[in-house]
Image (cartoon, rainbow, N blue to C red):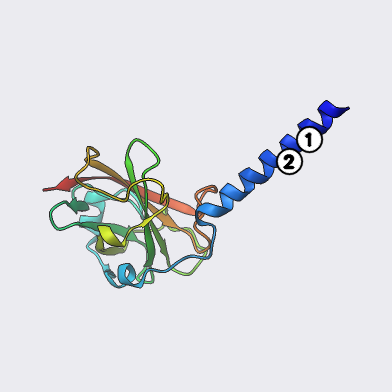
Amino acid sequence: MMKKKIILILFAIITLSCKKKKRSILDTTPSVNLKIQNNFKCEIANLTTLKLNYKKNLDISPNVSLYQWDEEYLKIETPVPNKNFKVLNAYYDNRHIYSTIIIHVTDSTSSETRNKPMTHLLKGKIEFKDLTNLNPYLPSFDPNDSKKIVHIVIYNDDGKLNPFRKPDEAGGGVIVGNP
């Protein structure tokens, strides 16, 4: 009888601690970084150019997007289906072997984006110092470390940014530095 109580207590403690961890990373309403948001614009793009560099909306092309080591910024371009897209914020996650930048975008609708026709380019710059670090216990983004490849995730979701659940949609790609 005592073993059952101990097992139940341990199970309850483990369950509660897992729930706390899920909430503590980034489970809030979308935070908006106005500096990042103001550095992006959405413009009509040439369809031939879009099809040459991208397969779908929210993709990243290493031919166009890159990070500048010496000037400390990321240059990002991604196709979107309308002019209403805006960047809410950009996050850095370095829990894996490679660096990951998560860019949270929205057009304030819940409609699907990936399979719609590409008509516009959402493009701009993100300074390294403006990236929100998802894991404050690990170092912030450092383009000069041994990780020369950066994975970019374009996260289209009108709700909360929560790494523990799948976003409404995501695209992305890999970019390399430009010395």
Q: Residues within 10 Å of mark 2 (few under 14, many from 20)?
A: few
On screen, residue 42 above or below 136:
below
Residue at 49% of width from left, 49% of height from top? 163
Quarter in which the N terminus is drawn: top right
Residue at 30% of width from left, 62% of height from top? 130
On screen, residue 146 above or below 37:
above
Instruction: Give the number of the disc on residue 142.
Output: none
Q: Secondary structure at mark 1?
A: helix
Percent coordinates x, y for residue 145 in the rendering: 22, 41
Residue at 57% of width from left, 47% of height from top? 21
Percent coordinates x, y for residue 59 in the rendering: 33, 51
Q: Secondary structure at mark 2?
A: helix
Q: Residues within 10 Å of mark 1 (few under 14, many from 20)?
A: few
Indicate the amino acid at tag 1.
Leu
Residue at 31% of width from left, 67% of height from top? 36
Image position of 96 (left or right of 72)? right
Image position of 144 (left or right of 7)? left
Percent coordinates x, y for residue 131 in the rendering: 33, 58
Report if the CB atoms under discs 2 and 1 are less than 8 Å apart: yes
**Distance between the alpha carbons at the discs numbered 2 and 1:** 6 Å
Can you tell which quarter of the image residue 27 is in?
A: bottom right
Instruction: Give the number of the disc on residue 8.
Output: 1
Q: Which residue is mark 2?
A: 12
On screen, residue 112 above or below 61:
below
